Image (spheres, rainbow, N blue to C red):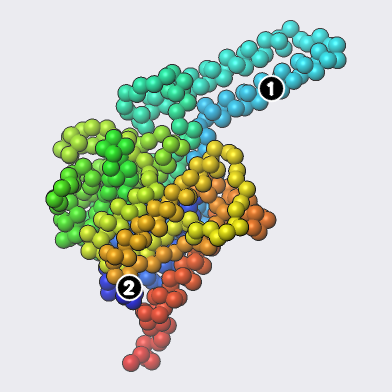
Amino acid sequence: MQPYSPERRTALVLCGTGAHGAYHAGVLRALEEAGVKIDVVAGHGVGAASAALAAIGGASRLWEADGLWRSPSVAAFYRWKWPLRASAWLVILLAAVTAAVGALGALGLAAPPWVPLAPLVLLLLVAVTLAVGGVVTGRSGRRRRRMSGRPWWRLLGAPFDADPIQQAFARALWQLIRGASPASGPAASELGRRYAEVLGENLGQPGFREVMVAVTDLDARTDLVAALLREPHQREFVAPRPGRERGAEVVDLSGTGRDQAGDLVAGALTPPLACDPQAVTFGVDSYWRGETHRLCDRPGAIFRLLEELASAGVTQVVVVSAVTHPQNPHRLSTPRLELRHRLSEFLGAAEAAALRDALEMARLRFDSVYVIAPAHNPVGPFDMAGAYDEASDRTQDLVELMARAYEDASHQFIEPVVGASGERLASRVPASERL
């Protein structure tokens, strides 16, 4: 491994899901305040959305006082779908009515005439709520595909709703690129087109960086990598390669794929199984000839990102992950039984395993590889309100996670690596005292 040098082409790679985006925010703030040179920002999952903002000088929208990860709307990210939430309240009300009827009978009191019919009415309301929710979801843009299966699977689908976090990042992107356009956000295709145009026109200017994001195409059964890079790297990115169909696995954001930028970020914000996949319709002039494919995130996409970055001329990478290092013996914690926590544990374990394997490959392909990660993090991907930490016997929220990320970036990379290289130390010396 060679020492860090700002002269080398450097990529910042952001990995993670959901609430781990707050960790990205803290790291980005530390790197920007230290003036660390980053040529390419890349990511998968929520890291793809963070990278899209950072590429157009909007990283501060993540950590500001009124920024995305400090907003009260964060509590709505990846919440249960409204039919399930409404049905749960109706079931609770049904249980209360049933208990009340039983209590009246035990006391020898006659219940009002309508009380015995209340459980039946509530059950009917539950069925109607689920049916309406299934119809609404089936008509939404997320499911622009004919589906097969039992009726109840059509009604239920995936349990969590990715729309709030997708809309939050879309608004943040639109506020940066809209210019004199109306305040209301456009369709995903228009957002993607404007984003690609703004980034392409300003690439190389202060605050603007090259970008690369990865999602998984469930229909093509491959990872889909989209990028907007400087020449000649963009030309090499889309160039044919022996034994591989590049049109099926890459999206050129500077050309025919610019309309897909918004949908690709939305797909990256869609965790597997937890949420319905994001549907994206490719252009008729693309490899897929107007087909509609389903996109979602995959923890193992970090491997593919590093592979494409190496081919794009990157020689130095900084990988950021909110997943902790492998646990030592006698560090077990009490498993939580809620579905969201079980999914969080799986995603965290999958990302840790994928990152470990990807770093082994990266050290063979890059001159320098650096990792910024917490030694301890109780906040899972779906812990938008924070999480109780058994080790410290208290609750840690996303603001504290951002602060921890800021410290980790300083202690793990900026001070020992950038500072040791002399770049940051030289900036502290007055010009009159420099040799």
Q: Secondary structure at mark 2?
A: loop
Question: Count of labels shown?
Answer: 2
Q: Residue at x 43, y 49 (%)?
A: 350
The crowd level at tag 2 (other Cα within 10 Å; few <14, some 14-19, many 20+) is few
Query: Does any portion of residue 282 appear in the rendered image?
Result: yes
Quarter occupied by residue 167: top left
Left or right of residue 94, residue 11 in this image:
left
Residue 372: x and y, percent? 44, 64
Residue 268: x and y, percent? 37, 45
On the image, numbered disc 2 is attached to which residue? 1
Q: Residue at x 36, y 21 (%)?
A: 148
On the image, numbered disc 1 is attached to which residue? 95
Q: Secondary structure at mark 1?
A: helix
Quadrant in the picture for the N terminus = bottom left
User: Disc 1 marks which amino acid?
Assistant: Ala
Q: Residue at x 47, y 26 (%)?
A: 156
Which circle's residue, 2 or 1, is located before the other in the chain?
A: 2
Q: Is residue 250 above or below residue 374?
A: above
Left or right of residue 394, residue 362 in this image:
left
Quadrant in the picture for the C terminus = bottom left
Q: Nearer the viewer, mark 2 or mark 1?
A: 2
User: Disc 2 marks which amino acid?
Assistant: Met
Residue 373: x and y, percent? 47, 62
Task: Kindly report the distance in space between the C-alpha atoms of the residues bearing marks 2 and 1.
Answer: 64 Å
Q: Residue furthest right?
A: 107
